[in-house]
Amino acid sequence: MTSSASDYCYTYEECKATADWLLVQTGVRPKVGIVCGSGLGGLADILKDQVVFNYEDIPDFPQSTVQGHAGRLVFGTLKGRPCVCMQGRFHLYEGYPVQKITLPIRIFKLLGVETVILTNAAGGLNQDFKVGDIMIMKDHLNMPGFAGNNPLVGPNDQRFGERFPCMSDAYDRELQQLAADVGQELGFGDFLKEGVYCVLGGPSFETIAECRMLHRLGADAVGMSTVHEVIVARHCGMRVFALSLITNQAVMDYDSRERANHEEVLETGKLRAEQLEKLVAAMVTRMEHNDDLI
Ligand code: HPA
């Protein structure tokens, strides 16, 4: 028997049951949801008054299988602002259907989250980018989506959102501007960039020909996450802001001796993690003072 998308979809009621299960056990009512990328889980550790759930204890939640992804959902406050933070996310290459990867985003929505902040590690395609740069995502290329692997495939429940959601405004412009302003104030101007992120399925890194192709298509950075979550967040009406940490230069040249590897990704994450955390924390604080942003 062949499986169809509806076999993997979680119903509104199933998502609600998980959200309600969480809400019973914590008094935190998050307005901001944060998804931490590879090696960037330290953001969750700076939350105050934490209530922590291991993914394995949450009904219907997938499990993290990747080194650098802890597998904990952390509720708490960031500068007084109630937040929920995924310390570890899910990827296509783990073998999860894309509807399962994005389940936590719908749970965010049902917890009351209004703004989602996502981080990821990415390879730099833009030749002006250096390892350690932080890229504000202004748009994306959804390669698995071109092949029909979009998280919204399957029955559409209007309680989440409309059948054909717009994506030309996926990345909130005001939040991008806020990040640029806050980054300047923190002295991060030299390594704060903006650009287009391209998602691939992974887990193999890209060939040289693939990197050249993606660059020509308009991608500034390439990775294996985030875009599916962004699509689901926008579908259910949450504001989205996303940052890529450029952990390696994608290899574009046959003479290069560079080799992409996961250890380099995690090492660069460690070096810049603190600044990335500072940027996100400062943004959340500012959002607090601007009610129409949250
Ligand atoms: N390619 C894909 N995903 C990545 C990379 C890369 O070079 N670096 C970090 N995540």
Image (cartoon, rainbow, N blue to C red):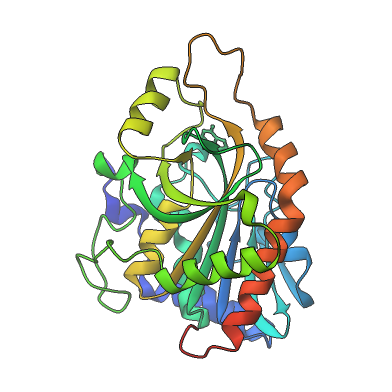
As drawn, which residue projects farthest toward the left?
A: 164
Q: As displayed, is residue 191 above or below residue 125? A: below
Residue 219 appears left or right of 188 = left
Q: Give whichever of 80, 102 is nearer the camera.
A: 80
Tell me which residue sits at (32%, 53%) in the image. Answer: 7
Q: Which corner quadrant of the image does residue 256 belong to? A: top right
Q: Which corner quadrant of the image does residue 35 belong to? A: bottom right
Tell me which residue sits at (41%, 60%) in the image. Answer: 230
Instruction: Tell me if I can see residue 159 in this picture.
Output: yes
Tell me which residue sits at (63%, 42%) in the image. Answer: 65
Residue 157 appears left or right of 281 = left
Give coordinates of residue 66: x percent, y percent: 64, 41
Give coordinates of residue 5: x percent, y percent: 28, 51
Of the 4 image quadrants, the one containing the N terminus is top left
Give coordinates of residue 109: x percent, y percent: 46, 76
Q: Give whichever of 19, 138 is nearer the camera.
A: 138
Tell me which residue sits at (54%, 88%) in the image. Answer: 290
Residue 224 appears left or right of 24 = left
Q: As displayed, is residue 177 above or below residue 198? A: below
Q: As displayed, is residue 191 above or below residue 55? A: above
Q: As displayed, is residue 182 above or below residue 212? A: below
Q: How many marks?
A: 0
> Which quarter of the rendered image does ligand 1 occupy?
top right
Q: Give whichever of 58, 137 is nearer the camera.
A: 137
Give coordinates of residue 140: x percent, y percent: 37, 50
Instruction: Tell me if I can see residue 61 in this picture.
Output: no
